Amino acid sequence: MNLKTLWRTLVAGAALALVFSLDMGSAQAAGGDQKFNSVCAGCHSIGGGKRVGPDLKGVTDRRSEAWLLKFIKSSQAMINAGDPDAVKVFNEYNKTPMPDMAQFSDADIKDILEYIKGGGGGPAPAMAPATPADIKLGGELFQGIVRLKNGGAACNSCHHVTNDAVIGGGVLAKDLTEVFTRVGGTGVGAILGKPPFPVMEAAYKDAPITPEESRALVGFLQDVDKKRAMQTPKDYGNQLVLGGVGMFAVLMGLYSFAWRRRKPGPVNQAIFDRQVKSQ
Amino acid sequence: MDIRAQVSMVFHLDKCIGCHTCSIACKNIWTDRKGVEYQWWNNVETKPGTGYPGKWEDQDIYKGGWERGGDGKIHLKGAGKGKGLANIFHNPYLPSVEDYYEPFTYNYLNLIEAPPGDDQPTARPVSLITGEPMDVQMGPNWDDDLSGTPDYARNDPNLKKLSPAEQEAMFQLERMAFFYLPRICNHCLNPGCVASCPSGAIYKRGEDGVVLINQEVCRAWRMCVTACPYKKSYYNWHTGKSEKCILCYPRMEAGYAPACMHSCVGRIRYLGVMLYDADKIEKTASLPENELVNGHLDIIQDPFDPEVIEAAKKNGVPDSTIKAAQMSPTYKFVKEWGMALPLHAEFRTLPMLFYVPPLLPVMASVTETDGAQKSKLNPIAKTWTDNWLYDTSTEELWGTIEQSRFPLKYMASMFTAGDEKAMAERLKKLMAVRIYRRWKTVGDIDEAKVNQVLKDTKLTHESAEAIYYLTSLAKFNDRFVVPPAHREQAIEMLEFTGDVKGSTGFGFRQKPERGM
């Protein structure tokens, strides 16, 4: 399974989890803004650029309300049915399926569309630029040098970033080097605050990341993203294998030297060699 | 003075007939299990020969025993702290299973269950280790009695000390001879196995000096297999633990002789307690090679000496053990008569199994004789009526010892760390007892000559008689003086015996009810 498929599986799973986790919340949500921010904003922005999914600014002009209703309820059904627009969007966004929003009634969706039509809350308030101290703290939190306040697992147990300041992390989840480009500061913040991926959600369910930590981590990831071109990740290629073979030979040589006086074989080998053997 | 008790053994090699009854008795009791099929805690070797495992005496191969360093201190040759740690995951001097022999059985079932066919069914040998059919390369006592063969006899490590001419002389058909060497664990005073064990699993029992491996502590580093120069610690591949001769301690605690000794057909084996001074062990084991044997014998103390008895009592040696030491047949052979010697004292483990060396067939000539020659012979010579003479006598009384078919150098290499004089002394004693008995029973020797012979060997009529008795007539209880085990004391060390008083013995398992 390559990383892309893994990512896709995760996203699909995350969406499913979202459905359940937001069941109660949506019942009490009054307006479209609340619903949008709690469910859609993880993947979509309104005038904030592409994230996991497309920027939704002006989507109500681009598509009919009926099309949108159908897509939001079950995008996969439309794609499977071969709707050309739906297939186009699906392919454009790396075939990442959008989860079915079965928890929303038509009225709920209309509320959300109304909110989008209104331009949302405008571009997200610009976050205060992360200070070097924030970035440093973020790096330490990422690696677990400083523990997360509520005891959550450090990011690098599952994630990796290509950065000279950081020792390589895990490969269980997505490489986060370019996550800032991919989902933006708000997206990262949203994911950290309320992880949409089931594994991550479970991991931080009882140990939520605090807003301060989230800010530091976003700052760190932004910094990582910015500096990624300047990193010099090493690609050992065949050298790694050849090095291993060479080292093995050296070790064997060392052993045969250290134990050069070992007993070479049975003392009666000469006798055994003369004996008649069965076929 | 730190007097302790040691159960020691004497094997009288002149009496060993090489029947392997001892080996079988031991195997049936202790090593008839999976994983130990190849182990012979007791084995009997033919000398000259390579033995079991092959060439075990050659410590250039197996690195067993102790070495005396330049500073006069001893250290283990192939194991110990530094070397043990360096080789802890690969012990480079271990004997392989081929050096013992790969144990096998035969697929007997095939003889009756083979489907009908053109050929007679056979029972193929099957390895007891892998379960696969195998070619038998070697078996227990494979080299038994092969005293002249180039493969076994001429590869005897003891021959290294002999010149090629001397070796050649040994293997002339007319001069060829061999003897048997039964071996068990020596229960040494300075055991290499105990010193080498990284887990501390091997210990020497305080009450009788039996060396044992605690099976619960053993972690199969197998350093003891290397460190024991006699190769009497074996690895059980099934349990992953090492095992060795336990001197049948369960039998001894019950007052019986160990199985190998009990079953010995030739009655060559003697067992008894000896008291020794533990303070002298390190100094003795570090002695230069030519002083080793005498130093070893000096460790053993006189059980009648009041000072020794007092020191022994102070150390908690029970009176019954001291009494057993005074009656010990091994003390008589080793110290009182000075006839028995340790095997390969140069390994410096101070073995407590002693051997009365064999007085092998001395040189003889078969010639046709006439009256003139006859008159020159001493009265020991025997002539037949047809004037053929089988002559084992010489003009000089002890000449035959020097000319024996086995060069003294060879015997000395085995028993006295190369000291031929000490070796000759023991052989002369054996010869002296024979001459004494010949005088007594046949009467064709002068009494003056007998007295001369006994004087030369520092024996008396009484001691010669006693040696004869213990060698030839001794009854079971003379040969084996097993010290009482005092299990009651052992139990009291483990638990308070008052606890169980009244809780065992005659009584009712259920409370009796009275009335109807």
Image (spheres, helix red, strand yellow):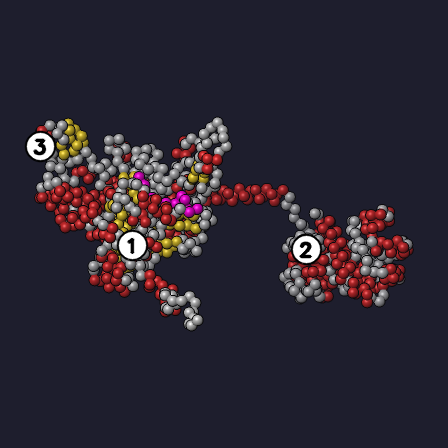
In front: label 2 or label 3: 3
The answer to whether tags 2 and 3 share a subunit is: no
For label 1, the crowd category at 10 Å Cα-Cα, with few meaning under 14, some 14 to 19 and many 20 or more, is many
Q: Is residue A220 visible?
A: no
User: Which amino acid type is shown beneath numbered disc 3?
Assistant: Ser
Q: Amino acid at mark 2?
A: His
Quarter of the image for the C terminus of chain B: give it: bottom left
User: What label does residue B7 carry, if any?
Assistant: 1
Q: Is residue B351 above or below residue B309?
A: above
* Res. B95 image quadrant: top left
- Which residue is under mark 2? A159
Range of magenta residues? B33-46
Residue at x 17%, y 32% (from the top left corner): B390
Chain letter, disc 3 residue? B
**Residues tagged by mark 2 and mark 1 found on one chain of the structure:** no
The reply, left or right, for residue A144 in relation to residue B337 is right
Q: Is residue A161 left or right of residue B483?
A: right
* Position of A30 relative to B222 (above/below): below
Q: Depth check: give the residue in front, B264 or B359.
A: B264
Q: Position of residue B37 (x, y in %)?
A: 41, 44
Q: Is residue B38 magenta?
A: yes
Is disc 1 placed on a helix, strand or loop? strand
Residue at 34% across, 52% down: B248
Q: Residue at x 65, y 54 (%)?
A: A170
Position above or below: B455 against A195: above
* Marks 2 & 3, CB-CB < 8 Å contact: no
Residue B135 location, x and y as percent? 44, 35
Residue A68 in the image, given as x and y percentages of width and height: 87, 55
Q: Which residue is mark 3?
A: B375
Among the two numbered marks 3 and 1 on one chain, the one whose residue lies closer to the N terminus: 1
Hey, what amino acid is under mark 1?
A: Val
Give the residue displayed 10% in from the left and 33% down from the top.
Answer: B376
